[in-house]
Image (cartoon, grey):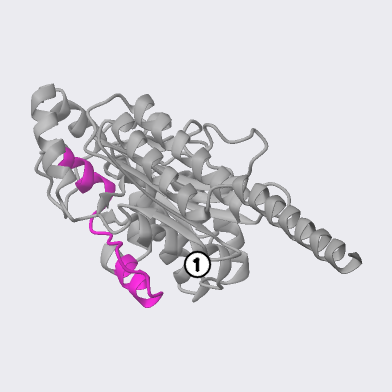
């Protein structure tokens, strides 16, 4: 009788344990693959919100885990191409061929179209002789902080030209990124304005030519511009470059720290990568905007000990207003921020 009772008790214990295990299994959270699928669905939703195609790649720096959607597709870089320009220019400085303190003179012909302080502050007459000299350090800061195009084209020349920038990317093992033109030619191609590469048109000439173009003409040339492989990047390629900038000694320590610090102080695109992140979040980034393209690429510091997240977000072929594209970038960045923060 005692043996029978012991057996019954053992069966009851096993049954209870099995029941408890089933209950525990029933409340297990969705698997990481389910979360990733939800994230992919969210990116598709936000791609529609952007009005064009949203390509994004994110890499968790400390673990190497990544997420990519349209990561191998080419997108116009616009001003985000100023990061590889800066890397090649700093590479020349590290080799002793240039100095950060070296002064570069500007004249009327060196003022190029696009956002920037130089062209707005120094509106010389066409006959004016050079009267402004800026250090190489100042030019790099203006190129990255406020996306000054006159400073950018000066930096590109100092870096050795587009071919040297692309060659340096290949040397680093980066694929999917190419730099082909100064901003003056890039903007000219976007507008369908013929520009002599050897005699870049000053800003006043661009302004007068742009006024002759109808919105429909600009829309047509913008579509052609989006299909042009020049000055493009894949989200994967840009994310790999940023990962390398964060983790590998691709420049001398002082140069690498200078570049990352300037990117941390970037004054453009506050409603893009940064737009929906917690206010105290540190983001080292560079934006890009032209025609139907709106971009932001950078390195996000996650809270606590969660590490860092590289994000390259590109929108192309969008006829929606820029704030709507920016909102799509902000929302996808927050989704990626939370995904990597809580899962990894």
Residue 145 location (% of width, % of height): 50, 42
Is 168 contained in the magenta span? yes
Q: Which residue in the protein does label 1 denote?
A: 244
183 displayed left or right of 313: left
* Residue found 13% across the figure and 45% down from its top: 195
The answer to whether residue 174 is seen in the rendering is yes
Residue 142 location (% of width, % of height): 47, 44
41 displayed left or right of 342: left
Decide which of 205, 164 is in the foreground and name it: 164
Is 172 contained in the magenta span? yes
The answer to whether residue 106 is seen in the rendering is no
Magenta residues, start to end: 164-190
Residue 145's place in the image compared with 120, above or below, is below
Dot 1 alpha-carbon crowd within 10 angstroms: few under 14, some 14 to 19, many 20 or more? some
Circle 1 — which element?
A: helix
Decide which of 215, 6 is in the foreground and name it: 6
Residue 218's place in the image compared with 155, above or below, is above
Q: Which quarter of the rendering shows the N terminus? A: bottom right
Residue 319 location (% of width, % of height): 22, 28
* Residue found 31% across the figure and 49% down from its top: 77
Residue 119's place in the image compared with 38, above or below, is above
Residue 44's quadrant in the figure?
top left
Q: Which quarter of the rendering shows the C terminus? A: bottom right
* Residue found 49% across the figure and 69% down from its top: 93
Decide which of 77, 111 is in the foreground and name it: 77
């Amino acid at each position: 009788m005692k043996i029978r009772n012991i057996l019954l008790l053992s069966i009851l214990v096993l049954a209870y344990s099995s029941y408890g295990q089933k209950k525990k299994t029933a409340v297990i959270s969705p698997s990481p693959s389910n979360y990733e699928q939800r994230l992919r669905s969210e990116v598709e939703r936000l791609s529609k919100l952007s009005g064009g195609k949203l390509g994004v790649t994110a890499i968790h720096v400390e673990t190497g885990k990544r997420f990519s959607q349209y990561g191998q597709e080419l997108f116009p870089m616009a001003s985000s191409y100023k990061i590889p320009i800066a890397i090649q220019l700093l590479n020349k400085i590290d080799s002793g061929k240039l100095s950060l303190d070296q002064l570069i003179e500007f004249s009327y012909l060196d003022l190029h179209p696009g956002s920037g302080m130089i062209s707005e502050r120094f509106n010389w007459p066409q006959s004016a002789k050079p009267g402004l000299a800026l250090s190489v350090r100042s030019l790099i800061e203006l190129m990255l902080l406020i996306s000054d195009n006159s400073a950018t084209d000066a930096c590109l020349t100092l870096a050795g030209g587009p071919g040297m920038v692309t060659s340096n990317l290949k040397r680093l093992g980066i694929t999917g990124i190419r730099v082909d033109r100064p901003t003056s030619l890039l903007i000219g191609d976007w507008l369908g304005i013929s520009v002599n590469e050897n005699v870049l048109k000053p800003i006043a000439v661009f302004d007068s030519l742009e006024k002759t173009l109808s919105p429909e003409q600009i829309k047509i040339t913008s579509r052609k511009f989006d299909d042009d492989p020049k000055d493009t990047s894949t989200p994967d390629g840009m994310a790999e470059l940023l990962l390398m900038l964060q983790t590998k000694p691709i420049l001398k320590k002082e140069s690498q720290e200078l570049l990352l610090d300037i990117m941390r102080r970037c004054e453009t695109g506050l409603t893009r990568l940064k737009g929906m992140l917690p206010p105290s979040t540190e983001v080292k980034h560079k934006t890009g905007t032209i025609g139907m393209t709106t971009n932001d690429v950078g390195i996000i510091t996650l809270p606590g000990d969660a590490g860092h997240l590289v994000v390259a977000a590109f929108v192309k072929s969008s006829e929606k207003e820029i704030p709507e594209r920016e909102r799509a970038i902000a929302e996808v960045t927050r989704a990626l921020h939370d995904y990597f923060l809580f899962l990894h």
